[in-house]
Structures are given as structure tokens and as C-alpha cells.
């Protein structure tokens, strides 16, 4: 995706400590990218036909609108305190949190949010905004989770070369900005066919399967060493499920990067199960990067390994 020149890092805030944590992460990302920081708060009440003005019987500084403005002012002050020379702006934007942040993502280099609901009715469902924004945003989305390990790597989950391109590109570029290395993780399961009438073949040769999956991982990272010679890329081939492996590695990571491709009839409306699991359980911040949808995807015959891998992701 082409990002406009000077595109800001956008941070969604709701007045919670989680929101301020997102601001601090957003400041770091904006400094790395030499771009401005934009703080937004979704002001949902006009959409619900509720007045945001102060009550005639209350203080002049009261009212929902003034409260929303204070949330933004506090977040802007936090950002300016952390980075006095960083250009920072803030705005109260009318709308539901998901819609506001997805709209902001079209002109952002990165959107940063907390891992809980961001205001309005959506805050009643823990993590609902985080899941919805990561599933729909036009830009990568950084979710403030856990505690980053300052000396750790950027960990990225690899599905295959076709579906992991955007996530891997973000991970390598981010590692270059942070001065660290990348751990590229590809998990696979040994396929077993036990159902009567199953048309898929049983794969008995575990070494051959591992070699096959190793080639998938090698092909996925090929070329990045030449483009970013300063970034070391360590490959980890893991027999088992991808989600638990990424969560375990998140304990030692600065950042975990996953793709946002979904499966099934709803397609782009959903995150993959691995992405959702990592969002809910990672012990470090998580970035979800959606691959652009191909204009006319070309079907190809599915191998047994493909079928098992799709079931995992």
C-alpha cells in the first residue's frame, strides 16, 4: 500500500491508562519514522442522539464534549512531554471508534490503539475495537499489549510467500528502524488422514515434509537480506500450531507482527485465527498487517500440506 508522504502515526485514545500507553508507543513509532503524531478520540454520543453540551444546571466546563476534549488534551500533553520536538496534533472526531479509526487509517503510516475497547458502547466488549480495526484498517495497526523486551527481536509469523509478504516487509523495515533482528516463524503440522473415503494422501515422510516446509520459509524471506543487509533474519521452523509458538516468542520480543488474512466466506471481514489468538495473548505489542486483496485471484490446486496449513491459520 502506498502511504502519503509525511503520513502521520495515528493514536486512538479513550482516557484510559491503556490509551496513554498507546500514546507512548505511538510517540516512539513517529520518532522512528520522522513523521508527525495525530491523536484522535472517537466521540460517539452525537451518533446516539445524545447532546454533548454542558447541563444548564451544571458547571460551564461540564458536558460530554468537554470531557472528550480533555481526553485528547491529556494525551497530547503526554506525547509532547515524551518528545518535545515531535509535531503533535489532537482532534475529537464524531463517530463510533471503529469507523473513526478505520477512516483515519487511509491517510496514516500506522494506527496505534490499546487492546481494550475505545470508548462508547464498544468498550463493553473487551478488545472489540482492536479486533475490528485490525480487520478493516488500510494501514498496519499496532495494538498496545504486554511489555516489549527492549533488546528483543521483531518476531513475524510466516504463512507462505504469497500471504506473508506485507507482514514480513513491515517486520524487516521495523527491525531496521529499531536496530534489531527479525525472527521469522513458520509453523506446520504433520498431516494425518484417518477418515474413511478421505481423498487426500497420508504423508508418512516427516523429513520430506520438514524439508518442504523449510523451503516455504526460505522462499518467503529470500531477497530481504539483500535489501536490508543490516538486518539479521533468523528462520525458525516449528512443528505444531503457529499461534502458541508466536505467543511464546512474544515473551522475548520487542514486537510481534502477524498478517491479517482471514479465511472462509467472510474473507476480508475477519482476522485469521492465529492473528486473533496473538492479539489476545501476546506478551508484547502486536502489529497486524493486512495483505492487499488481489484484483483477480487465480485458483490453484491445493496440496495436502496447504489444506493442513489453512486449517491451522
Image: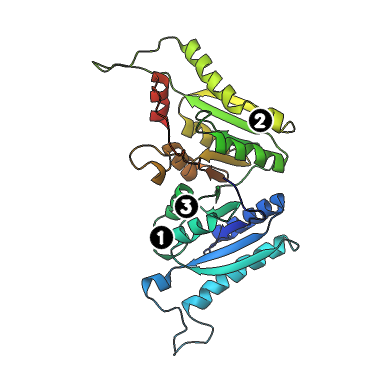
Vertical side of 105 occupied by 198: above or below: above
Query: In percent of the image, x 71 and y 64: which residue is there?
Result: 81
**Residue indicated by mark 3:** 133
Q: Secondary structure at mark 3?
A: helix
Query: In percent of the image, x 54 and y 54: which residue is there?
Result: 106
Name the mark on residue 74: none
Q: Would you call the spot at circle 1 few (<14 residues within 10 Å), some (14-19), or many (20 or more)?
A: some
**Residue indicated by mark 1:** 122
Q: Is residue 136 visible?
A: yes
Expressed as whole percent of the image width and height from the top left, the position of residue 169 reads 61, 37
What whole-number distance in Å separates the C-alpha atoms at marks 1 and 3? 12 Å
Q: Quadrant of residue 157?
A: top right
**Residue indicated by mark 2:** 224
Q: Would you call the spot at circle 3 few (<14 residues within 10 Å), some (14-19), or many (20 or more)?
A: many
What whole-number distance in Å separates the C-alpha atoms at marks 2 and 1? 40 Å
Q: Earlier in the sequence, mark 3 or mark 2?
A: 3
Q: Would you call the spot at circle 2 few (<14 residues within 10 Å), some (14-19), or many (20 or more)?
A: some
Q: Earlier in the sequence, mark 2 or mark 1?
A: 1
Q: Is residue 232 visible?
A: no
Expressed as whole percent of the image width and height from the top left, the position of residue 131 reads 44, 49
Q: How is the image coloured?
A: rainbow
Total tally of numbered discs in the picture: 3
Of marks 1 and 3, the one in the foreground: 3
Q: Residue lying farthest left?
A: 196
Q: Secondary structure at mark 2?
A: helix
Amino acid at each position: 500500500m502506498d502511504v502519503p508522504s509525511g503520513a502521520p502515526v495515528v493514536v486512538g485514545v479513550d482516557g484510559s491508562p491503556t490509551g496513554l500507553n498507546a500514546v507512548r508507543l505511538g510517540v516512539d513509532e513517529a520518532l522512528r519514522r520522522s513523521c508527525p503524531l495525530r491523536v484522535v478520540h472517537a466521540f460517539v454520543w452525537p451518533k446516539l442522539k445524545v447532546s454533548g453540551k454542558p447541563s444548564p444546571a451544571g458547571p460551564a466546563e461540564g458536558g460530554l464534549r468537554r470531557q472528550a476534549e480533555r481526553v485528547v488534551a491529556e494525551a497530547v500533553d503526554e506525547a509532547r512531554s515524551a518528545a518535545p520536538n515531535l509535531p503533535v496534533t489532537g482532534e475529537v472526531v464524531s463517530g463510533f471508534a471503529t469507523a473513526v479509526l478505520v477512516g483515519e487509517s487511509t491517510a496514516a503510516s500506522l494506527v496505534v490503539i490499546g487492546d481494550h475497547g475505545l470508548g462508547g458502547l464498544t468498550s463493553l466488549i473487551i478488545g472489540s475495537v482492536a479486533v475490528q480495526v485490525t480487520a478493516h484498517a488500510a494501514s498496519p495497526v499496532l495494538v498496545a499489549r504486554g511489555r516489549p523486551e527492549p533488546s528483543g527481536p521483531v518476531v513475524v509469523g510466516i504463512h507462505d510467500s504469497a500471504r506473508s509478504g506485507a507482514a514480513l516487509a513491515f517486520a524487516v523495515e521495523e527491525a531496521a528502524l529499531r536496530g534489531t533482528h527479525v525472527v521469522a516463524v513458520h509453523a506446520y503440522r504433520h498431516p494425518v488422514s484417518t477418515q474413511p473415503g478421505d481423498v487426500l494422501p497420508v504423508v508418512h515422510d516427516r523429513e520430506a515434509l520438514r524439508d518442504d516446509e523449510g523451503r516455504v520459509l526460505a522462499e518467503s524471506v529470500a531477497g530481504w537480506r539483500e535489501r536490508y543487509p543490516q538486518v539479521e533474519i533468523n528462520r525458525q521452523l516449528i512443528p505444531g500450531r503457529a499461534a502458541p509458538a508466536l505467543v511464546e516468542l512474544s515473551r522475548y520480543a520487542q514486537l510481534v507482527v502477524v498478517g491479517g488474512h482471514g479465511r472462509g466466506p467472510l474473507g476480508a471481514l475477519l482476522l485469521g485465527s492465529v492473528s486473533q489468538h496473538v492479539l489476545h495473548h501476546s506478551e508484547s505489542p502486536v502489529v497486524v498487517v493486512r495483505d492487499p486483496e488481489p484484483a483477480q485471484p487465480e485458483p490453484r490446486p491445493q496440496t495436502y500440506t496447504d489444506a493442513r496449513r489453512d486449517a491451522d491459520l
